[in-house]
Image (cartoon, helix red, strand yellow):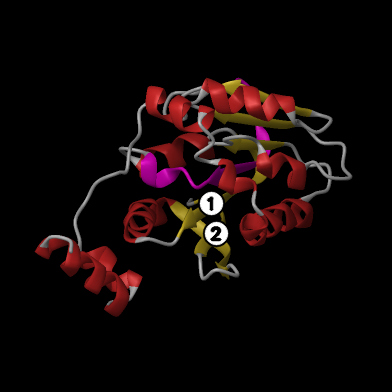
Amino acid sequence: MGSLSQVSRRLLRRTVPVEVRSYLTRGGPTGIDRTTWDQEYATGQWAKLGDFTEMPRYALIAGYTRSLSVAASVLDVGCGQGHLSNWVCQDTERRYLGIDLSSVAVEQARARAPRGARFEAADAATFDPCESFDIIVLNEMLYYMDQPEVVVERYGRFLAPGGALIISMFRVPESLRAWRRCAPRLEVLDQVLVRGSKGTEWNVWLCKPAQ
């Protein structure tokens, strides 16, 4: 049997809605250092992100990019092994750049990159693309950041006129806390709760910087 605190946490997860738990529980960002990310990608711990159970959120994000413009340029922040690029670049000629802290993930992404996709190893907190994009995707990465609201504001400055941010986060207390910090700096154009076949849920928001 687990400790009393472990039992209490499991009971809390089963009986209390995630929105309520995001207020009841404490915790900062779920930060992981570069070395750990590299080790986890090298040993296949994140291969599951290419599984069909992840399709719902990828399909929605790709749909948002197409609804804005089939030729839109895309910056994918926290791209991991580049799974989203295959959805975003499918049947289109578009400028796509994916960045990730893990150089191992970036090399894996390059090995399977669709035509037109580029990948760079970079820290999302400090990266400067030196160019603007029509769409910037912050996919499953904000709750890893010390100051997610600063990251949102930073990437808003790299949007082309009329551009949009697409934010996706696995629906857990940490992500909802990160969203509450970011929300005052954003205008939400659309939002969807996505539920996968195994009960996994994601919140996906289409936004632009608040004026």
Query: Which quadrant is home to the N terminus?
Result: bottom left
* Looking at the image, residue 166 lies above or below residue 173: above
Q: Residue furthest left?
A: 4
- Residues in magenta? 129-144
Q: Residue furthest front?
A: 1
Q: Are marks 1 and 2 in contact (CB under 8 Å)?
A: yes
Q: Residue at x 65, y 36 (%)?
A: 82
Give the mark nearer the N terminus: 1 vs 2.
1
Q: How many marks?
A: 2
Q: Position of residue 164 (x, y in %)?
A: 62, 48
Crowding at label 2, few (<14), some or many (≥20) Cα neighbours within 10 Å?
Answer: many
Q: Position of residue 168 (x, y in %)?
A: 53, 53
Residue at which label 1 appears: 167
Corner quadrant of residue 134: top right
* Disc number placed over residue 205 in the picture, else none: 2
Question: Given the image, on which type of amino acid does mark 1 rest?
Answer: Ile
Nearest the eye: 201 or 180: 201
